[in-house]
Amino acid sequence: MAAKIIVIGAGPAGMMAAGAAAENGAQVALLEKNQRVGRKLAITGKGRCNITNYCDNETFIAHVTANPRFLYSAINRFSCYDTVAFFEERGLSTKVERGNRVFPVSDKAADVVDTLYDYLTELGVEIYHKTVEGLIIEEGAVKGVRLDDREMYADAVIVTTGGLSYQATGSTGDGYRFAKAAGHTVTPLLPSLVPLCSDDADIPLLQGLSLKNVRLTVQDNQSEKEIYSDFGEMLFTHFGISGPMVLSASAHMRSMSPHRYTIYIDMKPALDEETLDKRLLRDLAEFANKDMINALSKLLPKKLIPVVLDRAEIAQHTKCNVLTAQQRGKLLHVIKRFSVRIQSFRPVNEAVVTHGGVDVKDVDPRTMQSKLVKGLYFAGEVLDLDAYTGGFNLQIAYCTGRLAGESAANVIHL
């Protein structure tokens, strides 16, 4: 007997879609090419899984960076609070951490995957570990899918294949191919929430240095405008910079080209230049007879000191008591505006999410159904939707998946 609804891809969107469709009375087949469901979900949040963000709908929408208005119907139908309740009701205890990030109390992403898997099996969703080669479309309506060994027919197909990031987990862009074959436009695919490469010669010297409580500002050198600013943590790497603030900043750097963007880091954002100057004068007085390389340890991390001095054009062995006011001014400037020229994004495979995807103009936001092909639905990262870090991208997957599953099941029953 043919499955009434086929869901392609057993990630968070696919599992939610399959479960929602089954809850609404549909017979559901969930097709996943990996031998396990939720592979990408199992490695999110460094293996802890930032399930969602504990915030209201307006806050959620404000954190979506691509096509936020498209999500009003989906988030109103299944909010961040609904997501927490969904997992709690199924026995997964959760906790809220800094920035309203929600995690399982166990700190194990595998427990999130297991909760979703149990949800599907209890509802009788049939899971097939099969590779989908393409969609079967006849007379403007989807009729099923072509597998590697046979055809499977259905009244509706929901595509939840994810993006291009973390390709080892199966996110290899299959859904974009299916969408194009169905006549959909796929917008340019870029990495988002991704580390950034710099060709500044001294950046590799800082590899492994983590900074906390610093301010990061992104300058678009083309428009000469500041396009993003944040306060928090970041990390220097062998290729450039990474860390929470950097990933969020990357979401604003859409048209990447070498040196179009410069990131400025304020190492001491709590102090204005005048206050910082007084602090620096105290340190210089205390270490009057010492070399500058040994006099800044109270102010800066050890690894940063030689790089900062070099940028301020101060020889490392300059004695503190001979430092001129002009040199001090230059040093202050480097500390308050430490620049990192951005060469490029890291590869899309290293991105948390993919920016771009199936153009939402051709998808009904009230149902997630294609406006071009009857019975074809899209949900999750395959759509041109993405957000900041903090659980927002997973929430996009849950709420769009849930809406697609419910809509498909209800249309079939009409």
Image: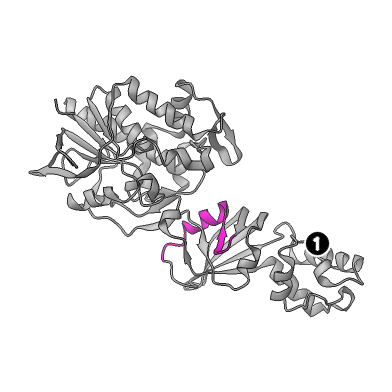
Q: Residue at x 48, y 49 (%)?
A: 388
- Callout 1 amino acid: Ser
Q: Position of residue 303 (x, y in %)?
A: 72, 63
x, y (%) of residue 161? 31, 44
Label 1, secondary structure: give it: loop
Quadrant location of the C terminus? top left
The magenta-colored residue range is 237-255
Q: Residue shown at 53%/35% (left/top)?
A: 102
What kind of colouring is applied to the model shown? one colour
Q: Quadrant of residue 71?
A: top left
Q: Residues within 10 Å of mark 1 (few under 14, many from 20)?
A: some
Question: Toward the viewer: 202 or 378?
Answer: 202
Residue at 18% x, 29% y is 4
Quadrant where the image shows the N terminus:
top left
* Residue 282 left/right relative to 43: right
Question: Which residue occupies the foreground of this view, 308 or 221?
Answer: 308
Q: Residue furthest left?
A: 139
- Judged left or right of residue 340, residue 147 is left
